[in-house]
Amino acid sequence: MNILRFTNLPGDGIGPEVMSVALKVLETLGQRNGFSIETTEHDVGGIGIDNHGSALPDTTLSACKDANAILFGSVGGPKWESLPPKEQPERAALLPIRKAFELFANLRPGNLYPELADLSPLRPSTVSNGIDVLCVRELTGGIYFGQPKSTQTLENGEEQSIDTMVYKTSEIERITEIAVKAASLRQKKICSVDKANVLETSVLWRKVVSDSVQRLDPSIELTHMYVDNAAMQLVRDPNQFDVLVTENMFGDILSDELAVICGSLGMLASASLGTGKNRLGFPFGLYEPAGGTAPDIAGKNLANPCAQVLSAALMLRYSFGMEKEASAIESAVKQTIRDGFRSGDISSGSESVGTIEMGEAIIERLPA
Ligand code: IPM
Ligand code: MG
């Protein structure tokens, strides 16, 4: 029997509730499809700080190193907001874990099901057929990690801070390769987003993306867009895009914009793929919902588990090579929405169901 070994890091807020749904979905699918899951749970984020004095405890990190993939919940909350920024759960857990596993490729699918079109802040005429855009964000380079990064006091007593935006050819080549692979399974269109009218890193970005696409698959339709224009085009007509590929900070911003035009953060999954391969020969990856910890509804059976469940589907697809099973989960979620099940965030004020009930509805719709 195929055993899926991964660590699960539920984290804070709604993390544990939605994680428990995702694990049940995987277990049930496994019972019906001849695989089982072997997963260990570890603290990360605020609960890591509380229990071990660190947002990314050593025990958690070493458990991740032993696993084939990480299923991540979400981290942060009001309890830890008064800590210095560097020590807050989001930054102190996510950034080091991305660096430790060189998780350079962040895939954020922006999907709006037509059934949920009225949740989008965009005009019905723009989104009545739904939205389907994939944002491929570079995740371990650029201004997030570039050195020097520091604050010093000048001779005149004022403070000065520096962040450094830096990219090498190889970093741009490898993220382009991921975008090309993704686009070849979709509409074969890539729009690369940069700020080449101002930034040196963007001039290099544009050149390397062009060369790489030409080398890897010249049949892909490649366009380039400045980031300010891309932010505008995304709200004007999101479906003009198929795959967006961009550097770390632009991707951070554009992926939040994509998330909100898709209606609810509770529906969006993400995958962060590393340079390393797991024991099965697939990319090691971290899979997490886009929505955050939603502390206001945590522990109340109100959270939408779909994003966590869809993140588990991405884990099967990318880190375990189980495309059929991944699609089965995605279809079950889609059918649950079609059949009218709505958690509070997607109910537009009408009747809603809880986290557990939403999970049961998904499980009922898994293939027998
Ligand atoms: C994200 C988040 C993180 C980022 C923060 C919490 C460090 O906004 O995953 O998009 O900026 O990458
Ligand atoms: Mg962000």
Image (spheres, rainbow, N blue to C red):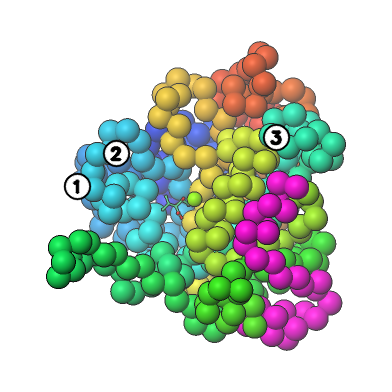
Q: Is residue 227 visible?
A: yes
Residue furthest front in the image? 156
Q: Amino acid at mark 3?
A: Ser
Q: Residue at x 45, y 43 (%)?
A: 73
Quarter of the image that includes the C terminus: top right
What's drawn in magenta, residue-wise? Answer: 208-236
Marks 1/2: CA distance? 15 Å
Marks 1/3: CA distance? 40 Å
Residue 259 to residue 137: above or below = above
Q: Amino acid at mark 1?
A: Gly
Q: Are the residues at dot 2 and dot 3 in contact (C-beta closer than 8 Å)? A: no
Q: Residue at x 41, y 64 (%)?
A: 144
**Mark 2 = which residue?**
81
- Give the number of the disc on residue 354: none
Can you give x and y, in whole percent of width and height, for residue 183 in the image? 75, 66
129 relative to 153 in the view: left or right = right
Q: Amino acid at mark 2?
A: Glu
Residue furthest top in the image? 351
**Mark 3 = which residue?**
120
Per the image, is 185 magenta? no
Can you give x and y, in whole percent of width and height, for residue 198 in the image? 56, 73
**Mark 1 = which residue?**
53
Q: Residue at x 67, y 21 (%)?
A: 348
Front position in the image: 363 or 179: 179
Q: Is disc 1 surrounded by few (<14), some (14 to 19) or many (20+) residues within 10 Å?
A: few
